[in-house]
């Protein structure tokens, strides 16, 4: 059963990347597969799909739309193949933050040290 679900997930990620690529008249630019045959990433000019195995019987798929700066996270139940949308976020304002929860030294501190060295 795991093989069927894993194969379905590979097809899902490839389908999303391929469908978007075909809409642009191009195929997927990249598709990486690990040794077990699980899709890890696929991309097209419009979407990036990332897949990660969860330890709790699920797989997480993250879809990123770089043009609209939006990401969506899905969980797939390996036993049933059920797909659940977990979150969607517009990243536009997140990407304008220069320093958040990054620890020390902050980027501005490193820049100040570099400026002092000149």
Image: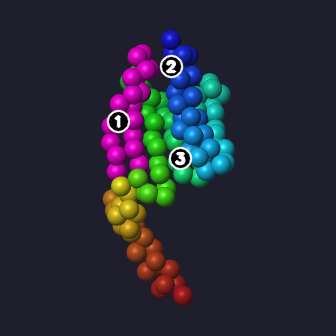
| Secondary structure at numbered mark 1 | strand
Q: How is the image coloured?
A: rainbow
Residue 26 image offset from top left, x and y in percent: 66, 48
The residue lying at 50 percent from left, 19 percent from top is: 5
Q: Is residue 97 above or below residue 108?
A: above
Determine the CA span between mark 2 and mark 3: 21 Å
Task: Indicate left or right for 59 with 17 as reference.
Answer: left
**Mark count:** 3
The residue lying at 47 percent from left, 85 percent from top is: 116
Determine the CA span between mark 2 and mark 1: 17 Å
Is 88 in front, or is 46? 46
Circle 1 residue: 85
Mark 1 Cα-neighbour bin, 10 Å: few <14, some 14–19, many ≥20: few
Which circle's residue, 2 or 3, is located before the other in the chain? Answer: 2
Quadrant of the frame with the C terminus:
bottom right
Q: Is residue 100 above or below residue 3?
A: below
Q: As drawn, which residue projects farthest toward the bottom? A: 118
Q: Which residues are magenta?
A: 71-89
Which circle's residue, 2 or 1, is located before the other in the chain? Answer: 2
Circle 3 residue: 48
Q: Is residue 27 visible?
A: yes
Circle 2 residue: 5
The stretch drawn in magenta includes residue 80? yes
Name the magenta segment's main secondary structure: strand
The residue lying at 35 percent from left, 30 percent from top is: 84
| Secondary structure at numbered mark 3 | strand
């Amino acid at each position: 059963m795991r093989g069927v679900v894993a194969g379905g997930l590979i097809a899902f990620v490839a389908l999303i990347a391929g469908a978007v690529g075909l809409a642009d008249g191009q195929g997927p630019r990249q598709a990486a597969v690990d040794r077990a045959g699980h899709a890890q990433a696929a991309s097209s000019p419009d979407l990036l799909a990332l897949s990660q195995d969860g330890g709790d019987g699920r797989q997480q798929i993250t879809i990123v739309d770089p043009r609209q700066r939006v990401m969506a996270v899905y969980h797939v139940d390996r036993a049933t193949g059920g797909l659940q949308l977990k979150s969607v976020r517009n990243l536009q304002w997140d990407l304008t933050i220069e320093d958040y929860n990054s620890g020390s030294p902050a980027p501005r501190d490193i820049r100040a040290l570099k400026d002092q060295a000149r």
